[in-house]
Image (spheres, grey):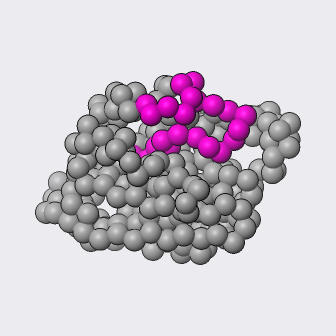
Amino acid sequence: MVKNDNISYRNSEYPQFRPPNGYTKNISSLVSVLKPLQLDLLAVEEINNDDYWKKLCEQLDLNNFITGKCDEWFLSNGIASRYPILSYSNHVYKASGEARAFLQCQLAGDHSFVQNRSFAVTHLDHVNEDNRLAQINYFQPNIDILMGDMNALTEDDYTESYYRRIVAGKREESQWEKPRFDLTDLITRQWGYQDAFRLANSELKDESVATCAYGTRIDYIYLRPRENDPWKLTKCSIVDSGEATDHNIVFAEFTREQS
């Protein structure tokens, strides 16, 4: 089995919210949540390329790891893998809003899931959907598994009442942008990616799908379908991170079909 995970390491998005333990280096808390998942690959946002990142990867037995920085002021994205990293590249876009980055890689080794399969993580703008669209269009992902904090909403995630009270209501109260679904529609409907969580959990809605403190799902694992792929998504869940991070964990598991 190969398991892919997408977490947010710490939060700098909304100054109104702080993680329960502040901006501390919470390695032990993260390990306690992530270790039982027995990950083969981990994708993170908002990290520093430092000894804490190295320590986290090593304690999870993910001894191959890379980072991709946005600019000198903004934190990095990272990927850690149980398998060697064959190649990687980091792409940065800054036009409007903050600089954002797109870190992609291919893995080596004899495991059939990772062979000829590409992985990427990104963290898109937290303020404006037009900025997010500009960023993802610049990156033009041609990736098999795309992960990250998209800061974007999916319309099917919410009932009408929850949408009015929580999604639109909180945004109006806080004077944020009105809810839009352009980015997730672009990725799934125009580019043909599959939303792993929605694929595995077609009926879940509202608070059951929340990945952030504001009661919405903004963290995703997207899959690009392959013809005759023996590896199938068997599970995708949102794992409560407790006090380890300010976002919940998106966890996906793939299993090879028996021939």
Asked whether, in this view, residue 75 is left or right of residue 125, the answer is left
Of 243 and 250, nearer the camera is 243
Q: Quadrant of the C terminus?
A: bottom left
Q: Is residue 17 above or below residue 254?
A: above
Which residue is depicted at the point 72% across and 67% down? 96
Count of marks, rendered view: 0
Vertical placement of residue 121 versus 15, above or below: below
Magenta stretch: includes residue 103: no
Q: Residue 226 placed where, x, y %?
A: 36, 69
Q: Residue at x 47, y 48 (%)?
A: 47
* Dominant SS type (magenta): loop
Looking at this view, is 181 or 53 the one in front? 53
Is the residue 244 above or below the residue 194 in the image? above
Q: Is residue 158 visible?
A: no
Q: Is residue 31 left or right of residue 241?
A: left
Q: Residue at x 51, y 48 (%)?
A: 46
- Residue placed most toward the observer, 194 or 54: 54
Give the percent coordinates (x, y) of residue 195: 51, 55
Q: Is residue 72 visible?
A: yes
Give the extent of the magenta segment.
2-26
Position of residue 242 measured from the top left corner of the image (x, y, whole percent): 49, 25
- Name the residue: 67% across, 67% down: 133
